[in-house]
Image (cartoon, rainbow, N blue to C red):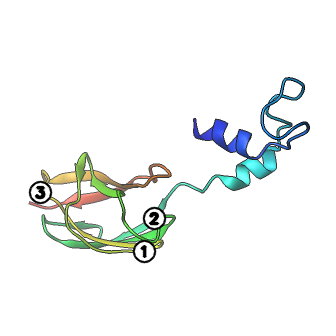
Amino acid sequence: DQVERAITANADDLGPAGWDSGFGKGRLNALRALKSVPPLPFVRSVNPAEGTVGTTVVIAGKGFGTSRGSSVVYFGNTAAVNYLGWTNTEIRCQVPDVTSGVVNLYVVTGVGRSNAVPFKINP
């Protein structure tokens, strides 16, 4: 769906404006379509790399968005509830109530899901 929107929004219109029977939606402009899609969020590091429930963690990376909005940090399948700061390159949140062990920490924004980084939940 996102790919189709990017392709059609960035096509070179060859006939009358919009869709027409002669040229359809226009000629594909792949480079412009690719450049129009924002990159997925990327987690570079998590500090500390382990902690107990309630520990404040700092997630560094890029593509998180300038404000949280509906974006979420996950510790395994459990979403963080307490957020202390959110910028495009850094998130501060607290470890949610989750079972101890190693979980995958990742960020989900309106653009998509980031890479996963291991985080150890201590008892």
- The Cα atoms of the two marked residues, 3 and 1, are separated by 24 Å
Is residue 14 or residue 63 the one in the foreground? Answer: 14
Callout 2 amino acid: Phe
The local secondary structure at tag 2 comes to loop
Tag of residue 64: 2
Give the residue drawn at x 37%, y 55%.
106
Contact flag, marks 2 and 1 (Cβ < 8 Å) = yes
Contact flag, marks 2 and 3 (Cβ < 8 Å) = no
Is residue 119 or residue 26 the one in the foreground? Answer: 26
Residue 60 at x, y percent in the picture = 42, 72
Q: Reading the chain from its start, which is encountered first: label 2 or label 3? A: 2
Residue assigned mark 1: 87
Vertical position of residue 80 compared to residue 113: above or below:
below
Callout 3 amino acid: Asp
- The Cα atoms of the two marked residues, 2 and 1, are separated by 7 Å
The local secondary structure at tag 3 comes to loop
Callout 1 amino acid: Thr
Residue 39 at x, y percent in the picture = 59, 56
Is residue 109 or residue 18 the one in the foreground? Answer: 18
Using the rendered view, name the quadrant where residue 57 is placed: bottom left
Q: How crowded is mark 2: few (under 14 residues within 10 Å), some or many (20 or more)?
A: many
Q: Would you say 23 lies left or right of 92 here?
A: right
Q: Reading the chain from its start, which is encountered first: label 2 or label 1? A: 2
Residue assigned mark 3: 97
Vertical position of residue 79 compared to residue 95: above or below:
above
Disc number lying in front (2 or 3): 2
Disc number lying in front (3 or 1): 1
- The Cα atoms of the two marked residues, 2 and 3, are separated by 23 Å
- Which quarter of the rendered picture does the N terminus lie within? top right
